[in-house]
Image (cartoon, rainbow, N blue to C red):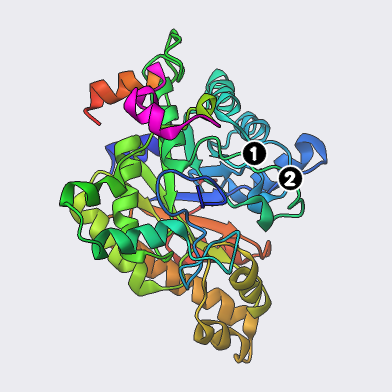
Amino acid sequence: MMSRVSEILENTKDQLFTVEFPEVDSGGLDRIAKHVNRISPWFDAANSTDNTAAHAHASNTAVAIAMKIYGVEPILQIVCRDKNRLAIQSDLMGAALHGIENVVMLTGDDVSAGDEPEARRVFDLDGPQAIRVAKVLTTGQYLSGRKITPAPDFYIGAVENPAAPPAEYRIQRALKKHLAGARFLQLQICYHPDLLENFCQGIAELAPNLHIIPTVVLVKNERSLNFMNDKVPGIDIPEETIKRVKESDDPGEAAYQLVLEQSKHSLSLPGVRGLHVIDFRRDNSLERLMRELGRTPKF
Amino acid sequence: MTCPKTLRNGPCGGVRENGNCEVKPEMQCIWVKAYERKDKLPLPNSWRSHYNDLRPPVDMQLKGTSSWLNLFTKRDQKRPAGWQNVVENNGQ
């Protein structure tokens, strides 16, 4: 078995388009189907998030399995905030049991970013260690050395934030994750084109086999930009970028144009193999963005 | 361990624009501080490069024990067997 994501990245020159699957709380599989209908014509795979921004939701693994039932290839995200090394390994093995191969291992936001800041933070592993643990499982053993036969097949990814200080160090950090076992990187949303460019340039030179997937986020207006700037750890948006949207005659259109521009710029950078899209607008702009980037619907 | 997230492998993606901690906005990220200090202090280059080593998961059984004793007895170098096997096959 080989996932579509690994097939595209490892065996073709094609671009990979992934999307963040909206978080799901209730409503049964009908809710999953509704989201699937919107995204599946346009994307190769979708990320199943793990309690995004430290808010509890239906579990990452459960949603990934549900996506698979509806024919969407999942990329399972696993963060280190809520689970110790035993729970992380059981998430991975449970996913493997259902034929899920793409996994992205990340440290995750702190509990203080969420609506239950009084919770115990776990971080028994950190991001680079979690990547290595996924890699250990693929060699047919648990972290303890206990054998697994047959070994699960994971296509392991990581994340990196090209704009977080020390920005010049982020290339080395991505390489560390690559050495730990990551084959591709989905990047944090980046509103500093120069930092994104330096990062991609560095990776392309030092690790040409590490595939970069930058992220863009569709928002309605400057209020969402302000929210991300203030509340989301690791996202910094320059004042002039927010102003450009706010002072436009049509802020909705200006916010869209910003994303279109970011997408085109990202896709033009060395080492970049595709794009990851987060859609907070949930209107027709997701389809518009895909069309204006030259994508044709699969059906 | 000053990092509120107890991270052992460098600065997370939540570091603020001013280099401060995601969890404690008033505190400089300890990994940012270490990054700056490793270049500023007169250290051998081999020590500087340790900054980027992949450090294994912490052995929680050692909590509350003497780190000096564990250093001398090399108890603190014990790795989970699965981790160790991959390190030996990978060379890192």
Q: Secondary structure at mark 1?
A: loop
Q: Where's residue A245, x and y in %?
A: 58, 84
Numbered-mark total: 2
| Residue A161 to residue A224: above or below | above
Judging depth in this view, the residue of A236 and A281 nearest the camera is A236
Judging depth in this view, the residue of A177 and A40 nearest the camera is A177
Quadrant that contains the N terminus of chain A: top left
Q: Where's residue A215, x and y in %?
A: 47, 59
Count residues near mark 1 (Cα–Cα under 10 Å), then give few for <14, some for 14-19, many for 20+: many
Identify the chain of the residue marked 1, using the numbered disc in the image: A
Identify the chain of the residue marked 2, using the numbered disc in the image: A
Q: Quadrant of residue B30?
A: bottom left
Q: Where's residue B3, x and y in %?
A: 52, 52
Count residues near mark 2 (Cα–Cα under 10 Å), then give few for <14, some for 14-19, many for 20+: few
Q: Which residue is mark 2?
A: A119
Instruction: Please check the rendered image and state whether residue A20 is part of the magenta-colored stretch, yes or no.
Output: no
Q: Which residues are magenta?
A: B64-81
Q: Secondary structure at mark 2?
A: loop
- State which mark lies toward you, 1 or 2: 2
